[in-house]
Amino acid sequence: MQYTVLVIGGGGREHAIAWKLSQSPHVNKIYVSPGNNGISLVDKVSLVKLNIKDNKETAKWSKENKINLVVIGPEEYLANGLADELKDVGINCFGPQKAASKIEADKYWAKEFMDRYQISTARWKGFVNADEAKKFVVNAPFPALVIKASGLAAGKGVIVAKDKEEACKAIDEILTNKKFGSAGESVVVEELLEGEEVSVLAFTDGKTIVPMAPAQDHKRIFNEDKGPNTGGMDVLQKAIDGLRQEHIPFVGVLYAGLMLTKSGPKVLEFNCRFGDPETQVILPLLDSDLFSIMKACCEESLLESQVVWKEDLFAVGIILASQGYPVSSSKGQVITGINDILHKTNHFIFHSGTNTSPQGELLTNGGRVLITVSLAPSLALAAAKATHAAQSISFEGKQFRTDIAHKGIARSILHHGKLTYKSSGVDIEAGDSLISAIKPVTCATQRLGAIGSIGSFGGLFDTKAAGYKDPILVSGTDGVGTKLKIAFEYNKHDTVGIDLVAMCVNDVLAHGAEPLFFLDYFACGKLNVNIANDVINGVSEGCKRAGCSLIGGETAEMPDMYSNEEYDLAGFAVGAVERNDLLPRIDDIKQGDIIIGLPSSGIHSNGFSLVRKVLKLTDKKYSDVAPFSENNGTIGDELLEPTKIYVKAVIPALRTNLVKAFAHITGGGFTENIPRVLPKDMGVVLDATLWKIQPIFAWLAAVGEINKQEMLKTFNCGIGAILICSEKDKDKILTKLQTENPKIIGHVTNCKESKTRINVKNFEEALELGMKRYIPDIVTKLSKPLKRVGVLISGSGTNLQALIDATRDSSQHIGAEIVLVISNKPNVEGLKRAERAGIKAKVIKHTDYPSREAFDSVMNVELDAVGVEIVCLAGFMRILSEKFVNRWRGALINVHPSLLPSFKGACAHKDALAIGVRISGCTVHFVEIDIDSGAIIEQAAVPVLPHDTVESLQERVKTAEHRIFPLALKYLATGRIQLKKDNSIMWNY
């Protein structure tokens, strides 16, 4: 059956509703009254002039025109009882009746309703007398600074005052001066809540609620939420249940404005309809049939399974307002640039206040003009795309905010960030697996005197058990890891030796041992005496700080193992501890014991593979001033800040015998290191607001898009070591540690679940505060126009997938978006990959054309139609015509499965195996008329193994192709390279 729908309203919200309804196969016709210019362009839509303030006339027209469903957008028509009139004539209405709409239309009634059903909300009181209201503002035991007109005031009836004087003035304007007419016959005076504001909307049939994606509405016109106001599922269910209990049916959308306070979410207000502009942002994420959902709500048959949302996408909308808004607004300005946005993938424009001139020009019509909405795999990228779209649309006096979604980006990264330590080449879990695998082997080497097993911070040896009368010896061994790579590139070598000592002696401390002596191992490809001297001087300095002797070492020159410019370090520390003082005293640790944290000096020496990957993504150099530096230091200097050595402060604390455990926060962060000193049934609760998280960690999380779990298991996040002691002993221990600025950061707790042994409260909030300063730069970088890419394929499209993944990963900053995929063969997997990614795909069969030139000409038309600027050949098995190559010269790249200029042509793997080369690989190059002869952009080598087949070599090379093809595209899209007239490449660094 085909249905006819009437939508009431004429703003951006109704544009989005009509647009989404038009996609339903069940909807044949959509009428909108009054509608707007943008709505009139939606498929299946006709605008109709109705007196929608006259309920009977609207109901009569709907009956005569066989309307099956009426969708009411604005709240005023719901409060006026239009839904009641429609019900009386037997027409379904998506929107509540008058009694239910009081939850929005009468704020006094709504607050009483919330109190009746114990729905958490701001403290409040209602008034009809201005003097009494002002007296309450002055004397209330809370900041009573939110003044609300009880009735509907077109979204302008809420004043958030900055002080009591302004609040009292607002009361006078509403109650005495009748600023909002009958809507202000009474006022609600509310407590000013602090926190993040979020909108939660749900579909409901009066019994069941099905939530929509949460949204954050930036209501103020100016950046940083300055300027006048313009406008938890448990909460919604409580409200619906309460309405049912009072025999008030509610069908439609219930919308709760929530404030996420420190004491939990509190309701700011309820609305009885779709929000504006939330609807314009939410509906593009809906994967289900909106009409079917609305019909189910009206028939009291709503099921959660009916509402499906697009996965792994974020939406951001930016409102473009007319000059003078919200105080006044101008009309009649010509709008340009919209069509350029509309043909972009995952970009939408919804009209709020537009008109057309007699000449057919699109004009502003005052107030909110339109909203640009963009979808992307990350919130930062969605914000950047929406911002760029807003910048691309022009009209005189245009104003819009450039910080939309910035509030949520830091938190989104901490929840959804994809960059991991493992992706940078270091697998903590694999290391744990190795320890488990080699335990039996190491046990086989046990002799008298060996204590414990591998996996602890240090190795212990009981000299008494071995026949001696000396105390227990504790040994520790470690290296500096890929922090050395930074020392190589920045040419600074005098601090890594300190790191080496620190990593070893801090581990020895974990067993209560005082480091006695140290040995180092320095291995290099070619000995550079000056560099080696700097390193060993650093080792010596580290030993001084640790109070141990540097008694020897080994320098090994191994040209076949290391390049001439590189070296590696290993260190070995041995300490001693009296038997009765051995740590950790796991059996003594009890619930309620105190966790004392010792601040770190920065990243220390773990996580640098991930740090270096983040740095590559930012395109910054080690000589650049660090954006996170507190003293204008360079990135190189900040990253090479040596690891803190805690020996001299900690040993006096240990000698009190009041410390039960010491943990060095090294590789694995909090989550891996603290459990090493705890009983199996114990965990810890830490509070991240109790110590300083240095800016470098916030910067890494923000620009690297690293989630909170990854941060906690990779970095020390500001705490280099922790000690555990009884609560009664904390003051004595703090006194001993005072030179290290110790902080009480948490306590020990019983814990049955190993997955939650380390609970870091407020970590997200603490890190988010630091991240926010970097968000504007991130969004600005992402807002730069992306190069539009077309990809030509013939088969499975694995390289296409690599390009899709890279261009959609905002942390990689590829600077490009794929807008079209063309295949010369139908039904290939590459087309399905494009479809799954929502990328336009076309099949143009070369066999349908008489010549190569004719085929290429048709491809050119399609590429030009969507504004393609760069063309990538990803397994495209056709030779291109001279005309096509010349048309795209300098913007046409290909990946070839060999190290060009060797093994050109279609049989590269076969040729490589036939010749017997030991190294092959892949090349990304510019395309020239001569096959595989263009300038080389990027290459990767792959070993050829003795028993390789064409298939096995092909798979190994493919992996390398997937790595370098996106990198080459990034070089071209971001302007790092240009093809010169002489066919050489200009590198722009």
Image (tube, rainbow, N blue to C red):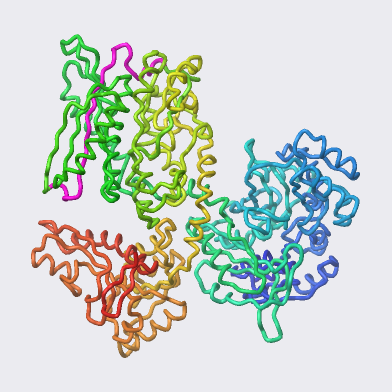
- Of residue 764 and residue 209, the one placed in the foreground of this image is 764
Residue 937 in view (yes/no): yes
Image-quadrant location for residue 483: top left
Q: Residue furthest top?
A: 469
Instruction: Kindly identify the residue that appears in the image at 49 percent across and 46 percent down.
Output: 415
Residue 109 in view (yes/no): no
Residue range highlighted in magenta: 561-588
Residue 335 position within the rendered picture, expressed as x and y whole percent measured from the top left: 64, 76
Establish if 84 lies above or below 537: below
- Of residue 191 and residue 797, the one placed in the foreground of this image is 191
- Report the number of numbered marks: 0
Q: Which residue lies furthest to the bottom in this view?
A: 850
Query: For the N terminus, which image quadrant?
Result: bottom right
Relative placement, left or right, of 478 versus 401 is left
Instruction: Kindly identify the residue that appears in the image at 43 percent across and 67 percent down.
Output: 817
Establish if 368 lies above or below 661: below
Find out whether residue 569 is within the magenta segment.
yes
Relative placement, left or right, of 698 versus 245 is left
Establish if 880 lies above or below 830: below
- Of residue 757 and residue 636, the one placed in the foreground of this image is 636
Establish if 468 lies above or below 973: above
Residue 737 position within the rendered picture, expressed as x and y whole percent measured from the top left: 43, 22
Residue 164 position within the rendered picture, expressed as x and y whole percent measured from the top left: 79, 42
Relative placement, left or right, of 539 versus 211 is left
Find out whether residue 647 is within the magenta segment.
no
Instruction: Kindly identify the residue that appears in the image at 9 percent across and 67 percent down.
Output: 914
Query: For the C terminus, which image quadrant?
Result: bottom left
Image-quadrant location for residue 657: top left
Residue 834 position within the rendered picture, expressed as x and y whole percent measured from the top left: 41, 67
